[in-house]
Image: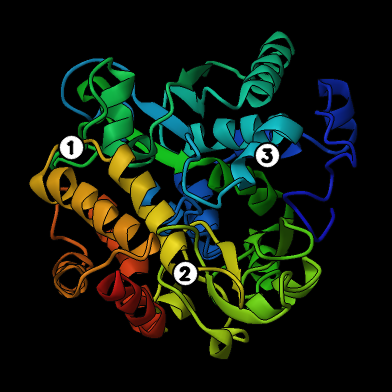
Amino acid sequence: MTDLPLTGRARPDRRPHTLAEWRAEGGYEAVERARSMAPPEIIDMVEAAHLNGRGGAGFPAGRKWRFMPERGTSPGEGPSYLIVNGDEMEPGAFKDRFLLEAMPHQVIEGAIITARATHADEAIVLIRDEYRPGIAAVERAIHEARDAGLLGDLAIRVHPSAGRYIVGEETALITALEGHRAVPRKRPPFPAQSGLWGRPTTVNNVETISLVPHILSLGPQRFRALSRTEEGGTKLYGVSGRVQRPGLFEAPMGTTARELIERAGGVSGDGRLRAFQPGGGASGFFGPDRLDLPLDFGHVAKAGSMFGTGMLIVLDGTACPVGFLARHMRFYARESCGWCTPCREGLPLVAKILDRFAAGQGRRADLELLQMTAAEAAPRGRSFCDLMGGAMAPLASGLSMFAAEFEARLAEGERA
């Protein structure tokens, strides 16, 4: 088994394996092992591996699975569900696309094992509609696995998503699957108690699910040893923005931004790193002084940002941070579900103000309003879901880190 469990068996041309090719690489051996184990034993291994969810929140996967009731113990009648979330729309994120398109059988393997551990009768792989090659690859893999008798009693299907950022929130995803407007739900009850169609449901990200077979193949201790920190395993890190060779890199959890940027060919433009977002578009900025910080959920949170998807966005010395923030905010304003007032009214207003600043038409009152809004809305829990807090995180850190740029744009506006 390779020390790069997620991508070690991927083809250089990203062509997805046939079932025969995948099994020749050792595929589905972990499924056979899982079938000889009781569900709590699988969860024990995942917990011992210290696998944190890779969708953004970093919640321990094994702990989440334990919330699911055993078959026959939940009230009422009906199936339990596993949803594999491939609605990847975080700015800067493109890791799940690779796994769906190039390694679909790995996703199916993980889904089979996770469904057994969580007592799920049906698995749904939700993929954003723009990922057409990924949809085709996963559907083919499902058909091959079903024809080979590898699915057992598990019903599994692909659901192409209409593609909204809010669908990345698990309760909004469930609401959308039921055919309703994608709006988050109040919790409790949590999905493990009342999820899809009111039945027990687990939602996990594509990367999380893809790691599960390797925990059973390697064993939890060896899986943990792949990491440099207490958070086990490897991570698919993305690097985009102002770098020479934007790309996706599998590396030990806890790899530093300095190493990842070097693997991406270094900073482009003027070659000077101004700042980077460590976890995609909803993470606060770090400066060059954080280049050697281990990138995992714990270290990044302690340093004042969010690890999120683990997808770095790099700004060089020539990048305009005000325009960068304006583009981010337009995205979040557009993608808000509009359910609560802070997002529905606040995000379009902030986007409009940032557009004015980017055009050199900002006013002092605008800057004061941005500062007040960031201070009030950046802390999580100030809106119905975390979208507002995520949108405000880069603004709050950007107003501080790029204060001189905002003042310069303000001076332009005052001269106009």
In the image, is residue 269 above or below residue 133?
below
Query: Mark 3 or mark 1, which is nearer to you?
Result: 1
In the image, is residue 35 above or below residue 354?
above
Lateral position of residue 20 relative to residue 148, left or right: right
Mark 2 vs mark 1: which is more N-terminal? 2
Please state which of residues 305 and 62 is positioned toward the viewer in this rendering.
305
- What label sits on residue 321 in the rendered view? 2
Which residue in the protein does label 3 denote?
A: 99
* Alpha carbon distance from label 2 to label 3: 31 Å
Q: How crowded is mark 1: few (under 14 residues within 10 Å), some or many (20 or more)?
A: some
Please state which of residues 333 and 37 is positioned toward the viewer in this rendering.
333
Amino acid of disc 2: Pro
- Tell me the residue at 25%/58% (across/down): 353
Mark 3 vs mark 1: which is more N-terminal? 3
Element carrying mark 2: helix
Amino acid of disc 3: Leu
- Tell me the residue at 58%/46% (across/down): 207
Residue 401: x percent and y percent? Answer: 40, 83
Lateral position of residue 48 relative to residue 63, left or right: right
- Tell me the residue at 18%/48% (across/down): 343
Element carrying mark 3: helix
Element carrying mark 1: loop
Please state which of residues 97 and 81 is positioned toward the viewer in this rendering.
97
Residue at the outermost front position: 416
- What label sits on residue 338 in the rendered view? 1
In the image, is residue 325 above or below residue 62?
below
